[in-house]
Image: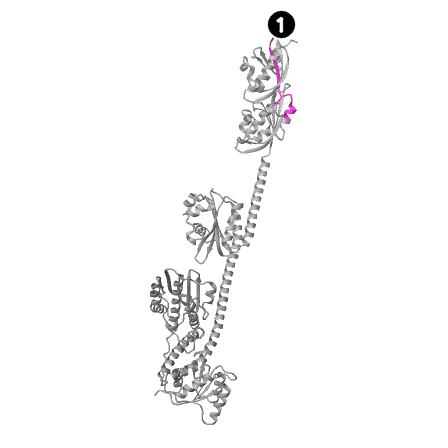
């Protein structure tokens, strides 16, 4: 067999054979080298060996070639570049090339790809290619020598795409610096491996997260050959973790919100006024959930208005921009939030969410944007169908509120609705209690005044009885023939008249209206004008003499209808009130004062108010103001003025209200029921002329019996007296049986053994035609059933003659 040429043999070898000359130029290259690296022999002959070696590995390769040229064979592993830009890992065995003389003229290097298809380590290659994790061999300059199929799948790129790039090119920008730092430390020998969580960008733009483990492979001299990188795709795990973290964050947020709701609920239940509930709500929300504009409003259904109760500092600019002030009632249609809520829901209920004010058609959008509010959430506070208020929240960014925010606000407003509702109930209860207290005080005052009236009535009765003989004998003395006696009697009469006037004023306090008293239509406005004119010297002239100016003003309701009343009594009551107002202003010591008389209508009542800017009253004085003889004027006052006013209003089925404050002034309001009257019945005056009569006088007071008997005997009448009812009845019956009946019986009411009422009944039973005149110190309004007439003590000559004349005088 013929020996084949050497080149033919080398061409047939299943290994790469590359021959270099002493200058490192490629002078021969077999077919296996062409298959692995891609260049043909013609393309590489004469080129430097650096064509195949990356720049960062050329120094090491040069040292190997230098050793071989010195006659030392060498084996090393190196990453090599292919024509298409890929990197392949090759194991090289290099030996010296000698000529026939034995001189070294070059280098023969043989190699095979460690991991390429058809390589000698087929089992290892298949293991790496089919591994369930991504595996790459990377050169020190971070270029891939080898990537398996799983790595290509993870990164969403082909093997060819990865071969032409560095891994840093597909790394997420935020992870580049850390990976570079660890990789460089690995090459420097500062560490043998490292593991990190890293993100890569797939060709479709998706982000994948992997756990990257890197380890360096070094040659015998310790120089790094390549870095093995293993990637485990944990994107699904990271997504799940993120979802779990999101849910945990939501749970934490919800727990924090629930804690806030609980705190607000507890705080609100400890408060019973809406203002403090609003304050603690906003403060609690700001303390635990800051960064949100908040404003809390209360709703008043009576006026369809909202009142800003509380807001935080962030909400002040938008509220100011919209002209909303704390504590100032604003109609619902003038509050942009409420108006928008009503348009959105059809009523002031539910919630309104504006994700971006800039893209809304709301009329207040510009103001809100200028004030830094971009998104808005409004929630009505309702208890059932009852609107109680509104919570408004704002944030500076668009889409500032999500569904969780709306749920939280809705739950918060449900708590606030309960708190607001309870606060309103408590306020209503407190008002009712205060009204009850006022009613109780009024009732107690009325009871006290009633008791004082009864006491005054008793005093008047006793005084009247005591005055009967004084009046009778004084009138007799006035007819005495001796002038000095008549003069003394006249002075006594003047003193008696003064005393009687005091008694009559006291009687005006307690006297009820008599059934015989007829009401007449009274124009309150005209009455006020009359009283103002009548009292002008008191409120205008007298104060000016002391350097005090009083401005009296009228505020009259000209639509006020007439009331049913007694004009004279109402004028006297108003006169007393004006005098009191003048005294209060002058007592204050200021140079100017104001009195306002106002009329008006309140439900079914007409009223007259007299308001002054005088010294005012404290509570104790106000409560005692209507008590008889109670006065703050010292010796100048009788203490009967307001008592008389009280009696007047009682007789008119009305009431008196007083409001006063020390140093501020007093307002007295007279309330009259509105009712229709037709006019008053005229009184016919009777001529007091009498024939001689036979009269029976009954009274338990001997002085009264004596004085009346003397007075009537001087008028020509026959008089018989009795000290009690039983004695009088016996005398009356005896006179009847003897055929000498009395023409009339005059009897007191309050007597021992048998009182006047019982005597009246028995007299009328025995002789119905006999007139009975009741004499009373309780006042002329008391007329027992069956009595023919009533005369009041102290009994004067003329009223007694008029009463008798009314019974016995018959006009022609």
| Residue 122 among those drawn in magenta | yes
Question: Count of labels shown?
Answer: 1
Q: Between 85 and 287, which is closer to the camera in this rendering?
A: 287
Whether residue 134 can be seen here? no
Please report the bounds of the magenta region as a residue range.
99-126
Residue position for label 1: 101
Whether residue 674 can be seen here? yes
Locate residue 535, reporting x and y percent: 35, 68
In this rendering, is residue 405 above or below 553?
above
Residue that sits furthest to the bottom in the current view: 738
Locate residue 771, reporting x and y percent: 43, 87
| Residue 496 among those drawn in magenta | no
- Residue 132 location, quadrant: top right
For the C terminus, give its image quadrant.
bottom left
In this rendering, is residue 48 above or below 559?
above
Circle 1 packing at 10 Å, graded few (<14), some (14-19), many (20+), is few
Q: Using residue 662 as the reference point, say whether residue 535 is left or right of it.
A: left
Locate residue 396, reporting x and y percent: 46, 42
Q: Between 122 and 321, which is closer to the camera in this rendering?
A: 321
Residue that sits furthest to the top in the current view: 101
In this rendering, is residue 437 above or below 788?
above
For the N terminus, give its image quadrant.
top right
**At 50% across and 68% down in the image, what residue appears?**
444
């Amino acid at each position: 067999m013929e020996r084949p040429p050497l080149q033919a043999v080398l061409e047939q070898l299943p290994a790469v054979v590359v021959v270099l000359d002493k200058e490192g130029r490629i002078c021969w290259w077999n077919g296996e080298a062409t298959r692995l690296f891609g260049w043909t022999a013609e393309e590489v002959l004469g080129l430097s060996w650096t064509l195949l070696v990356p720049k960062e590995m050329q120094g090491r390769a040069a040292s190997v070639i230098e050793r071989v040229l010195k006659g030392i064979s060498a084996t090393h592993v190196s990453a090599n570049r292919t024509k298409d830009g890929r990197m392949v890992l090759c194991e090289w065995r290099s030996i010296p090339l000698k000529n026939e003389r034995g001189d070294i003229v070059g280098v023969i290097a043989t190699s095979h790809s460690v991991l390429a298809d058809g390589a000698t380590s087929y089992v290892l290659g298949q293991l790496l290619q089919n591994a369930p994790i991504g595996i790459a061999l990377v050169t020190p300059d971070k270029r891939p020598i080898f990537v398996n199929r799983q790595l290509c799948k993870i990164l969403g790129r082909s093997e060819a795409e990865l071969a032409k790039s560095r891994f840093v090119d597909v790394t997420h920008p935020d992870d580049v610096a850390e990976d570079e730092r660890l990789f460089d430390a690995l090459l420097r020998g500062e560490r043998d491996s490292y593991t990190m969580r890293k993100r890569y960008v797939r060709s479709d733009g998706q982000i994948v997260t992997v756990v990257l483990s890197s380890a360096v492979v070094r040659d015998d001299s310790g120089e790094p050959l390549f870095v093995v990188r293993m990637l485990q795709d944990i994107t699904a795990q990271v997504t799940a973790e993120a979802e779990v973290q999101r849910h945990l964050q939501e749970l934490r947020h919800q727990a924090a919100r629930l804690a806030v709701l609980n705190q607000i609920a507890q705080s609100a239940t400890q408060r019973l006024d809406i203002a403090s509930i609003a304050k603690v709500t906003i403060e609690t929300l700001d303390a635990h959930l800051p960064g949100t504009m908040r404003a809390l409003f209360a709703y008043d259904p009576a006026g369809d208005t909202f009142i800003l109760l509380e807001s935080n500092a962030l909400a002040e600019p938008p509220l100011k921009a919209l002209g909303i002030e704390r504590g100032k009632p604003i109609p619902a249609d003038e509050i942009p939030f409420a108006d928008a809520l009503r348009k959105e829901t059809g009523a002031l209920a539910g919630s309104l969410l504006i994700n971006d004010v800039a893209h809304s058609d709301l009329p207040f959008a510009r103001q809100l944007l200028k004030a830094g509010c971009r998104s808005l959430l409004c929630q009505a506070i309702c208890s059932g169908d009852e609107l109680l208020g509104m919570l408004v929240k704002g944030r500076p960014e668009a889409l500032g509120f999500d569904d969780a925010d709306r749920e939280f606000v809705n739950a918060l407003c449900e708590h606030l609705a309960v708190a607001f509702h309870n606060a309103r109930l408590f306020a209503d209860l407190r008002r009712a209690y205060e009204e009850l207290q006022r009613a109780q005080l009024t009732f107690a005052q009325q009871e006290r005044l009633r008791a004082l009236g009864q006491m005054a009535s008793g005093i008047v009765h006793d005084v009247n009885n005591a005055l009967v003989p004084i009046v009778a004998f004084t009138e007799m003395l006035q007819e005495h023939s001796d002038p000095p006696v008549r003069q003394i009697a006249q002075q006594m009469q003047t003193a008696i008249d003064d005393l009687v006037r005091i008694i009559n004023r006291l009687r005006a306090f307690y006297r009820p209206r008599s059934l015989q008293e007829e009401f007449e239509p009274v124009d309150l406005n005209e009455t006020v004008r009359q009283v103002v004119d009548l009292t002008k010297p008191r409120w205008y002239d007298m104060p000016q003499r002391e350097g005090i100016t009083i401005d009296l003003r009228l505020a009259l309701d000209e639509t006020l209808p007439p009331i049913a009343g007694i004009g004279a009594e109402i004028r006297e009551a108003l006169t007393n009130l004006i005098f009191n107002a003048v005294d209060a202003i002058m007592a204050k010591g200021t140079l100017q004062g104001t009195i306002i008389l106002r009329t008006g209508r309140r439900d079914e009542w007409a009223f007259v108010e007299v308001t002054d800017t005088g010294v005012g009253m404290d509570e104790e004085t106000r409560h005692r103001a209507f008590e008889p003889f109670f006065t703050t004027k010292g010796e100048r006052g009788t203490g009967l003025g307001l008592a008389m006013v009280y009696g007047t209003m009682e007789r008119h089925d009305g009431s008196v209200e007083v409001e006063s404050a020390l140093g501020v002034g007093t307002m007295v309001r007279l309330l009259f029921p509105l009712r229709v009257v037709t006019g008053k019945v005229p009184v016919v005056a009777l001529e007091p002329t009498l024939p001689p009569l036979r009269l029976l006088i009954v009274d338990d007071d001997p002085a009264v019996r004596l004085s009346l008997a003397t007075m009537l005997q001087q008028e020509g009448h026959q008089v018989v007296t009795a000290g009690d009812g039983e004695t009088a009845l016996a005398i009356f019956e005896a006179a009847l049986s003897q055929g000498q009946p009395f023409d009339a019986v005059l009897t007191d009411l309050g007597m021992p053994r048998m009182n006047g009422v019982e005597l009246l009944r028995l007299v009328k039973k025995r002789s119905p035609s006999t007139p009975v005149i009741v004499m009373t110190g309780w006042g002329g309004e008391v007329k027992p059933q069956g009595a023919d007439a009533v005369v009041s003590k102290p009994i004067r000559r003329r009223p007694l003659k008029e009463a008798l004349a009314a019974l016995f005088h018959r006009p022609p």
